[in-house]
Amino acid sequence: MNAPRIAEARVEDPGLDGIRLDVFVSEHMGLFSRSQAKARIVEASVNGKPARLGRRLKPGDAVSVSWVDPPPMDLAAENIPLAIIFENEDAIVIDKPAGMVVHPGSGNRSGTLVNALLWHCAGLGSAFGGADPRPGIVHRLDKDTSGVIIVAKNPRAHEMLAAQFRSRSARKRYIAIVKGTLPAESGRIETRLARDPRHRMRFACVRTGGKPALTFYRVIRGYDAFSLVSLRPRTGRTHQLRVHMRHLKTPILGDPLYAHPDARFAEATLMLHARSLEIILPGEVTARSFTAPLPERMRVVLQKLQSLSPR
């Protein structure tokens, strides 16, 4: 096991009054991301006394943190082309293609977005301690969902960006092609989501338990038995948009888990695209909006839908 490491700092800025210890460690000491703190910190103290990570600090507090670096992960950097929308020293915004897994996991040790980023962003792995299997990953997109995804290049940026997803101030918009007609031209879907007990790969809307999920939708155009819709999730539950569309009996075309195949569009993969992301970057005060163009796979389907009778 690696020897423990120790870092110390003092809360000097009056504006930090009330900041959580784990946030201070991440954003101001720059040791590692807040999500890593619980797993890696062996001991923390404030003014010489043991303290929990949720402890609120005040100006003048002396913070000491002891942690152990886990053994490095054997993640390979791979020269995979990336469609880069934006990049600076703190973050990179990618237009992820459908079919790419975001980070390595069981059965996916290569070909992921993380493998590509380790090649493109020198020092990304070491910036997160070399042991994080998801270095810099702030949020996720399903393998078959394309579009905008933002990745942090250092722990401070990661915490700043992740906080906006937790507070729901980061605004995401998706475009989807669904089968059927939605109940109104616009509306909201508010349910609770939990894993489907009858199909462990899926999630389902439940009356009790689970987690709250909220999505706003707007119909862009109707095509006979299909609709082009704009979706704005206010929460970020796994498969949320896919489950919510199925809940309205308008499943996303090409969805292998929540929709039946349609012979007219046998070639269709999941017709879901993360169109835009609005978020404040580290060091800035005004939100930026990043957009990914509609992918060719969806444009082909839309061209075929043009021949159907519009609603």
Image (spheres, rainbow, N blue to C red):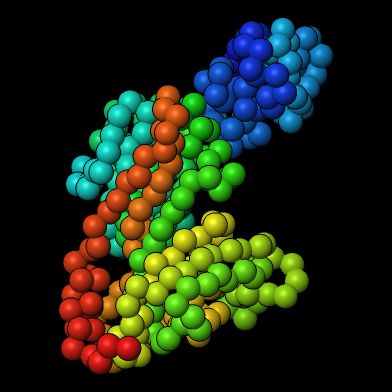
Q: Is residue 226 above or below residue 152?
A: below
- The residue lying toward the viewer, choosing from 120 and 208, is 208
Query: Can I make out residue 253 in this image?
Result: no
User: Where is residue 209 drawn, in percent x and y?
Assistant: 74, 67
User: Where is residue 70 drawn, in percent x and y?
Assistant: 54, 30
User: Where is residue 183 drawn, in percent x and y?
Assistant: 50, 83
Q: In the displayed structure, does residue 198 sit left or right of residue 280?
A: right
Residue sitting at 42 percent across and 24 percent down?
283
Q: In the displayed structure, does residue 157 sit left or right of residue 88?
A: right
Residue sitting at 56 percent across and 17 percent down?
29
Query: Can I make out residue 300 in this image?
Result: yes
- The residue lying toward the viewer, choosing from 213 and 39, is 213
Q: In the displayed structure, does residue 244 sit left or right of residue 255?
A: right
Could you say which quadrant of the image residue 153 lies in? top left
Report how many numbered discs are placed on residues in the image: 0
Residue sitting at 47 percent across and 69 percent down?
217
Could you say which quadrant of the image residue 300 lies in? bottom left
Please identify the residue farthest to the right as the structure is shown: 49
Which part of the image, by quadrant, shows the C terminus?
Answer: bottom left
Which part of the image, by quadrant, shows the N terminus?
Answer: top right
User: Where is residue 128 drawn, in percent x and y?
Assistant: 46, 29
Q: Is residue 311 above or below residue 57?
A: below
- The residue lying toward the viewer, choosing from 68 and 204, is 204
- The residue lying toward the viewer, choosing from 22 and 285, is 285
Residue sitting at 32 percent across and 46 percent down?
290
